[in-house]
């Protein structure tokens, strides 16, 4: 469960399991406050067309960098949408954590620093060809050469807000997910990085 859904996702799914191990999707969600992050891979359509089956290796190499940094920063990787990653840093709940005087600054700083590290590590990787050189031995020389000038890059949107955390789906297929306009806003903020020609925006 922890590998399939992430540590936070496993906890969410776990609450929907009965003592007999049966899944009950009809359980209300829980409102949480969190920092939501969307990270999208740039030029992904080109990468898919050129890499073909090696595209899985490409995405997983980025995921390895992304997920390790997110976990170290106190966050949880939630979903991968092919060319995008959804990330969550859950804020503490309680009487004194919703006041304007308690902004849980450490977690905000940690999430921002985390994504800056991810962006930096990917920039240091250089071209797509050098990023994949150890893992694409089956790639043709023509396909490999087309990536000598293409750099690995991502766009990141971070937004703090509330969401309903819960298990979404049925007994056939279920996901640990977050429902909220704030989640959608994090995605829209990431999209705006293209318009403003920057790697990261936050609100």
Image (cartoon, grey):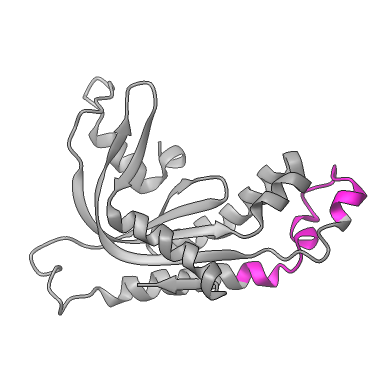
Residue visible at 92% across and 50% down?
A: 141
Q: Residue furthest left?
A: 95
Left/right of residue 43 with respect to residue 37 in the rendered view = right
Q: Magenta stretch: give its range.
A: 121-144
Residue 110 in sight: yes
Is 150 or 165 nearer to us in this picture? Answer: 150
Q: Is residue 14 above or below residue 41?
A: above
Residue visible at 71% across and 67% down?
A: 125
**The N terminus is located in which quarter?**
top left
Q: Is residue 89 above or below residue 49?
A: below
Q: Is residue 117 above or below residue 166?
A: below
Residue 37 in sight: no
Q: Is residue 30 magenta?
A: no
* Relative image position of residue 37 (x, y in whole percent): 41, 61
* Relative image position of residue 61 (x, y in whole percent): 64, 53
Is 58 or 200 nearer to us in this picture? Answer: 200
Tell me which corner region of the image, top left, top right, bottom left or bottom right, holds residue 194: bottom right
* Relative image position of residue 43 (x, y in whole percent): 66, 57
Residue visible at 41% across and 45% down?
A: 6
**The C terminus is located in which quarter?**
bottom left
Q: Is residue 75 above or below residue 140?
A: below
Q: Is residue 130 magenta?
A: yes
Left/right of residue 165 with respect to residue 174 in the rendered view = left
Left/right of residue 13 with respect to residue 191 in the rendered view = left
Q: Residue furthest front?
A: 195
Left/right of residue 104 with respect to residue 97 in the rendered view = right
Q: Residue furthest bottom?
A: 101
Is 117 or 158 nearer to us in this picture? Answer: 158
* Relative image position of residue 73 (x, y in whole percent): 42, 66
């Amino acid at each position: 469960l922890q590998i399939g859904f992430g540590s936070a996702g496993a906890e969410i799914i776990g609450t929907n399991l009965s003592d007999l191990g049966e899944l009950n999707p009809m359980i209300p969600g829980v409102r949480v406050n969190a920092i939501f992050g969307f990270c999208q891979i740039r030029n992904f359509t080109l990468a898919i067309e050129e890499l073909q089956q090696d595209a899985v290796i490409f995405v997983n190499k980025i995921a390895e960098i992304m997920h390790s940094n997110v976990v170290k920063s106190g966050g949880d990787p939630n979903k991968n949408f092919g060319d995008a990653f959804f990330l969550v840093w859950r804020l503490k709940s309680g009487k004194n954590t919703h006041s304007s005087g308690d902004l849980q600054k450490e977690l905000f700083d940690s999430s921002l620093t985390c994504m800056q590290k991810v962006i930096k590590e990917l920039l240091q990787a250089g071209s797509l060809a050098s990023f994949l050189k150890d893992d694409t031995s089956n790639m043709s020389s023509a396909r490999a050469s087309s990536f000598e000038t293409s750099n690995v890059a991502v766009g990141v949107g971070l937004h703090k807000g509330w969401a309903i955390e819960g298990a979404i789906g049925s007994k056939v297929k279920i996901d640990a997910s977050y429902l909220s306009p704030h989640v959608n806003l994090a995605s829209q903020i990431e999209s705006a990085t293209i318009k403003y020609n920057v790697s990261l925006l936050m609100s």
